[in-house]
Image (tube, rainbow, N blue to C red):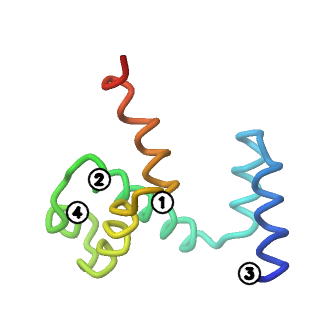
Amino acid sequence: MDESFEDLLKLFAKTTDHDDMRQLLEELLTPNELKDLILRWNLMKDLYRGKPQREIAATYGISLCKITRGSKILKQKDAYTKRILSDRYDDHLRI
């Protein structure tokens, strides 16, 4: 990938304080970009929890095409997003 992308990855990885991360994202992204990122995260959570794609589309007023990308990611065996969601929402399944 591009060197600038690698710089951003290092910056995000280094930013561990919640308020600093909020400020960084608000400074780097426009309100609409933040809104899109939040929408993407919400639909990933809904998909992971088993909410039907058509219901997600109706809830957020988006096309099924936008949801399909998230669905494909969650079907990947080693998807990082899937691991994050599992850690967050599957605690009740752990013994």
Can you say which quadrant of the picture contains the N terminus? bottom right
Please report contact status of discs 4 and 3: CB closer than 8 Å, yes or no. no
Which picture quadrant has residue 10? bottom right
- Residue 10 relative to residue 88: left or right: right
Using the numbered discs, state the Cα–Cα distance from disc 1 to disc 2 in whole angstroms: 12 Å
- Residue 24 relative to residue 47: left or right: right
Residue at (44%, 36%) from the top-left corner?
Answer: 88
- Residue 89 relative to residue 59: left or right: right
* Front position among marks 2 and 3: 3
Check disc 2 and give the amino acid type. Answer: Asp
Image location of residue 6, percent across then percent down: 80, 70
Q: Earlier in the sequence, mark 4 or mark 3?
A: 3
Please report contact status of discs 2 and 4: CB closer than 8 Å, yes or no. yes
Using the numbered discs, state the Cα–Cα distance from disc 4 to disc 3 in whole angstroms: 32 Å
For label 3, the residue is 1
Q: Earlier in the sequence, mark 1 or mark 3?
A: 3
Using the numbered discs, state the Cα–Cα distance from disc 2 to disc 3 in whole angstroms: 30 Å
* Front position among marks 4 and 3: 3
* Front position among marks 1 and 2: 2
